[in-house]
Amino acid sequence: MKHIAILDFGSQYTHLIARRVRELEVLANIYPTDISAKDLPKDVIGIILSGGPQSVYDKNSPQLDAEIFNLGLPILGLCYGHQLMAENLGGKVEPGKTKEYGRAELVKREDAVIFKNIESPTTVWMSHGDTVIKAPPGFKPIGSTNDCDIAAMANNDKNFFGLQFHPEVRHTEQGMRMLENFVYKICQAKKNWSIESMVDDIVARIKKQVADKKVFLLVSGGVDSSVAFALLTRALGEKRVYGLYVDTGFMRLDESEEIQTNIEAAGFKNLHVLKAGEAFYKNLEGITDPEEKRKIIGQTFLDVKDKVAKKLKLDSDDWLLGQGTIYPDTIETGGTKHADTIKTHHNRVDAIQKLIAQGKVIEPIADFYKDEVRHIGHLVGLPDKMINRHPFPGPGLAIRIICRDVNQPSPSTSAQAMADKQPPASPAGRPPLKGGGALVLPIKSVGVQGDNRTYAHPLAVWGENDWEKLDKISIQVTNSSKEFNRVVLLLNLAKKAPRLKLSPDKKSLTPDRIKLLQKVDNIVHEIIKKEGLYDEIWQFPVVLAPVGDKYFESIILRPIVSQEAMTAHFYRMPHNILENMAGKILAAGKIDYVFYDITNKPPGTIEWE
C-alpha cells in the first residue's frame, strides 16, 4: 500500500509523526535509520526524517544512506532531520547561541508549498540546541524565529524541506496544515487509512498473539488499562482474561473504591481486587531517587502478580501478562534505538522488558496515544465517566512525592546567580509586588529538552501575575540556562522573602506523607470540579516537596493542557479560583508554601519524577 516512510532518529515525537499522517487518513510506516535506499519499499511516496537527541556533527550520531536523497522522492526533515539534511547536502550545523524549548514565533521569509495557506507570524514548538547556520546549495531559508535564522528551508526543485520546529505537535498552531501540504500537495497521497477500522484490527491481532492461551491483566482503573481490558475481553471472552486491580496504597483519596465501582458498572465481571500497600511501602522504605522508585514499583507489581498466580496455581506457560501500555510510556523509557530515556515507566522495568523479549507480554494499545485510546474506548462502548478521567500514573502518588536524601547537594552558586538576574514575578490574584524576585528551589525534577532527559532545579519567582508575561519568563529562563528546566510561581508570600530550605531530615515515602498529599489533592480536585474546570484541564498532578521553613513540606500545582501528552502548556487558571485554592491548601495545615508550575512541555515533563 502506498505510504509515507518515517526514518526514526530517536525523537520523542517519531511515532507522533506517524500518528499525524494517519489522522490525514494516509498510511505511514516507521523505518530504522540504517535502512538502505534500495531496501525502502517501492510503494513509498514520501520520506520524513524525524528529530533525535544527538548532534549531527558527533562521530557516533545516527546517519542515513545518502542515496535516499537520490530516489526522487519528496523529503521533509524535522529538527534533527532538518539538521541532518543540511549537513549531508552541503550546509552547516553548529550549537545554537540560544537554545529553544517550547513556544517560538515563526515568520515566513519565502513562499514554498510546505507553507501554502500558512499565516505569518505563527506559533511553533521548538526543542533544540543545535542550529542550521548555512543552508545547503539549492535551498532557500523560508522561515525564521528570533533565535533561529534558518528555522525552515526549502529546495522547491527537489521537493526537499527542512523544519527546525515540530509540526507534528499540537502546540505548533498550523503544524497539521504544513503536514497536510507535504502529504497531499507534495507527495500526492490518497486517503487509505481510518481509525474506525482499527478496533477490528486490534481484536484480530490479540487473537493471533494469544492463540490458545489466557491473559493476566494488571488493571489500574485508568483510561488505558480499562480500554485494554475491554479489548482483551471482547477478543477472548471473560473466562480467558483475569483482571487484577492492585491497591498499592498510593492512590488518591477513596479512589480504589471508585475505580472498583466504575469497572463493575461498565459490565466487567472478571475483575479481582488485592490490597498490597504493605509490600509497596516495605520495598520503598528509605528510597529517595526517582528512577529507583519507579523501578521498584514496577518490580513490585510483578511480584504481587506472581504471588496471585501461584496462589491460583496458574501455569505461566499458559498465560500472558497483559498491560495497558500506551506509546508515550515506551518512548519516554528509551523505547527505540536512538531515543534517550527520560524516565523509566513502571510498565517498562527490566523484568518486563525480558518478558517482552520472550513473547510473554501483550499490550493491545501500545502503539496509540491517550486521545486515540479514548476514541477506541468510545468505539468499544465504555462509559464517558471512565474514558474522560484525568490520566493518573500507575505508581500513583508515590511519584508525586519528592523525597530527600541528607547527602543531596545544595544548588550551585551559579544557579542562584542566574536566579538573581531574573525579572520579578507576584502571588496570583494580587497586584504586582515591588519586592518581586526569584530563588532556586533546592530540589530537582525531570525534564525533556532537545529529546534528552534533564534533571535540574526549578526556579521559583514572584512579583508578577500576568500569565502571558509569566509564560515568557519561563521560556526565557529555561532557554537561556541549563541550570533550570522548570519555573514555578510562588502563590503565598509574606512581607519578607521566602525561606526555601530543604528538610533537614531524610524524607522518603511514608504513610503520613501519602495522607497529607491525598488530603491536598482532594481539596484541589474538589475545587476544579465545583468550578467547572475539570474538563478544561487535561491532567492535574499535585506534588509534595520537602521544602519550606517550618513543616518543610510544600505543594506544587501542575495543571496542564494537552492532547496526547507529548507536548503540553500550563493551564491559565482564573486568579480568584487559584487564590482560593492556595488558601484552602494552607488552611489544611502542615504546608509552608504553595507553588504553581508555569512550565510547558518541553522543557518540563508533565510529572515531576
Image (spheres, grey):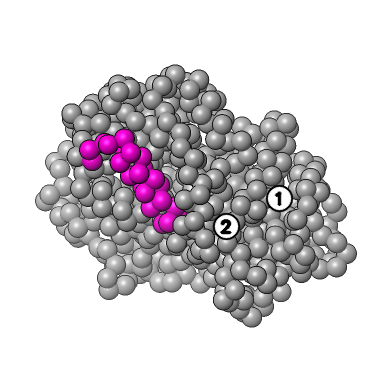
Say which residue label 1 marks.
Answer: 467
Packing grade of label 2 (10 A; few <14, some 14-19, many >=20) is many
Give residue 10's quadrant in the image. Answer: bottom left
Name the mark nearer the viewer: 1 or 2: 2
Q: Is residue 13 above or below residue 206?
A: below
Regarding mark 1 in the picture, which secondary structure is present there?
helix
Residue that lies at the very extreme toward the right in this rendered image: 495
Q: Position of residue 233 (x, y in %)?
A: 33, 24
Q: Which residues, given as a range, are shown in magenta?
A: 294-316
Look at 22% across and 50% down and name the residue there: 357
Q: Is residue 350 visible?
A: yes
Asked whether the residues under the numbered discs 1 and 2 touch, taking CB atoms below 8 Å apart as contact, a structural biologist would say: no
Rendering coords of residue 236 (x, y %): 27, 24
The residue lying toward the viewer, choosing from 175 and 524, is 524
Query: Which residue is depicted at the point 33% across and 22% down?
Result: 238
Q: In the image, what residue type sits under mark 2?
A: Leu
Give amino acid for label 1.
Trp
Q: Is 309 a magenta residue?
A: yes
Say which residue label 2 marks: 509
Give the left or right position of residue 362, taking residue 300 as reference: left
Instruction: Answer with left or right where residue 563 lies relative to residue 466.
Output: left
Mark 1 or mark 2: whose residue is earlier in sequence:
1
